[in-house]
Image: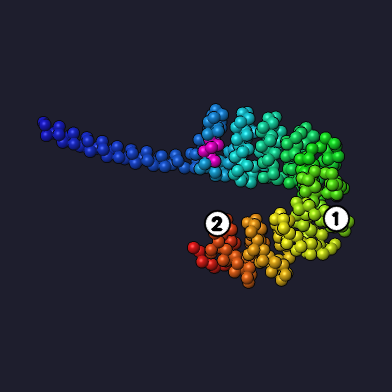
């Protein structure tokens, strides 16, 4: 009887262990399935459907850290219009400001009607990241109801999306005495982006006015490039004679757009020899279209080897990003990538050489 009992105990134990192992294997399999994308999506959907604001925030954080799939980002887009908590809406908008997703414009169209000022501030910034002319009407309507930094942000976006129907209203704002320097800068930026003819007079007037603030004149100098003409070329020559470094720098930058009206290359080359770093920097950037001229190539090489400005060296590298340079310039770029003590310059030179499949000694 004892024997039978012992045998039964052993069999029962073995059977139990075998069953336990089988169950564990099955549970392991189920867990593997549960951790798939489909399960994750279901959990996130449930969090937004039934969760508290803090649980929804946690779901957004989870997506941001490790689950940036199109399916999960689409969940955020579709949920936005149903969300009643402004902090969650704001967090969704901030998420898309840092995580590129092509189907977010419909969310923005809804968000532009938000009643929370803090949310709207984030939405206006998002419009610049995902420009769409469909935003135009809502932005034009909003610009008349906002002031200060919020209004300036909207004007900036109107320029980014090249909204044509905003011009007359922005000119009206510009002409008001109450218009601040920052607002004027944004309106000038708008006309720089759109080149709408109606804005030409405020651009030329602001650039010509010696009583206007420096920052307004700087932006006007950039904006004049949107209106190339013989008379505006003459205005650029007049501004160059004022010899104000920061103003000169910006005029030099747009001079290539006036090449049919005068010898702009001469002005740019002269500016590339300026004692002022900002003037040299903008001149170097403006010389990109002339880089194949023998004299210009020699000057760029000289500046590359002898200018102590990191920004200017980077600007010259950018000029040769698509070809890696040639002749002595290529040799100089290779030398920089191989032995420069400036980490930023060394890495950028290496990136350009790698992009153009140019061999060098990678240390």
Q: How is the image coloured?
A: rainbow
> Residue 45: horizontal and vertical position, in percent?
54, 35
Mark yes or no: residue 12 visible.
Answer: yes
User: 299 or 20: which is nearer to us?
Assistant: 299
**For the point 60% across and 65% down, which residue is it?**
333
**For the point 11% across and 31% down, which residue is it?**
2
Residue that carries the numbered disc 2 in the rendered image: 343
**Quadrant in which the N terminus is drawn:** top left
Residue that carries the numbered disc 1 in the rendered image: 238
Q: Which residues make up the magenta segment?
A: 59-64
Q: Which mark is residue 312?
A: none
Q: Residue furthest right?
A: 231
Is residue 60 shown in magenta?
Answer: yes
Task: Provide the secondary structure element on which disc 2 rests.
Answer: helix
> Residue 203: horizontal and vertical position, in percent?
83, 48
Local packing at callout 2 (Cα closer than 10 Å; few below 14, some 14-19, many 20+) is few
Q: Earlier in the sequence, mark 2 or mark 1?
A: 1
- Marks 2 and 1 sit apart, C-alpha to C-alpha, by 41 Å
Q: How many marks?
A: 2
**For the point 63% across and 38% down, which residue is it?**
93
Relative to residue 168, is residue 329 depicted above or below?
Answer: below
Local packing at callout 1 (Cα closer than 10 Å; few below 14, some 14-19, many 20+) is few
**For the point 59% across and 58% down, which residue is it?**
345
> Residue 193: horizontal and vertical position, in percent?
77, 49
Mark yes or no: residue 322 visible.
Answer: no
């Amino acid at each position: 009887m004892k024997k039978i009992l012992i045998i039964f105990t052993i069999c029962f134990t073995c059977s139990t262990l075998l069953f336990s192992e089988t169950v564990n294997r099955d549970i392991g399999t189920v867990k593997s399935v549960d951790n798939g994308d489909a399960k994750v999506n279901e959990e996130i959907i449930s969090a937004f459907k039934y969760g508290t604001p803090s649980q929804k925030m946690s779901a957004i954080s989870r997506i941001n850290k490790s689950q940036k799939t199109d399916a999960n980002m689409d969940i955020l887009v579709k949920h936005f219009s149903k969300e009643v908590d402004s902090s969650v809406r704001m967090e969704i908008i901030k998420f898309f400001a840092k995580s590129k997703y092509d189907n977010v414009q419909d969310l923005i169209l809804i968000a532009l009607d938000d009643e929370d000022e803090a949310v709207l501030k984030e939405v206006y910034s998002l419009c610049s990241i995902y420009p769409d002319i469909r935003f135009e009407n809502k932005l034009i309507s909003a610009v008349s109801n906002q002031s200060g930094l919020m209004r300036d942000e909207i004007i900036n976006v109107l320029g980014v999306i090249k909204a044509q129907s905003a011009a007359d209203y922005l000119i009206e704002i510009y002409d008001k005495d109450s218009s601040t320097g920052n607002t004027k800068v944004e309106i000038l930026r708008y006309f720089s982006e759109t080149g709408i003819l109606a804005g030409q007079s405020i651009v030329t007037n602001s650039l010509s006015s010696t009583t206007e603030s420096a920052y307004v004149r700087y932006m006007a100098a950039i904006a004049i490039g949107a209106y190339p003409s013989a008379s505006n070329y003459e205005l650029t020559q007049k501004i160059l004679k004022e010899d104000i470094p920061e103003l000169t720098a910006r005029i030099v930058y747009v001079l290539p757009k006036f090449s049919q009206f005068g010898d702009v290359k001469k002005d740019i080359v002269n500016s590339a020899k300026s004692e002022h770093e900002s003037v040299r920097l903008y001149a170097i950037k403006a010389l990109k279209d002339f880089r194949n001229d023998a004299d210009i190539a020699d000057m760029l090489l000289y500046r590359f080897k002898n200018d102590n400005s990191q920004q200017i060296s980077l600007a010259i590298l950018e000029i040769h990003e698509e070809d890696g340079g040639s002749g002595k310039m290529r040799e100089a770029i290779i030398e920089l990538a191989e032995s420069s003590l400036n980490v930023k310059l060394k890495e950028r030179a290496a990136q350009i050489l790698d992009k153009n499949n140019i061999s060098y000694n990678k240390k």
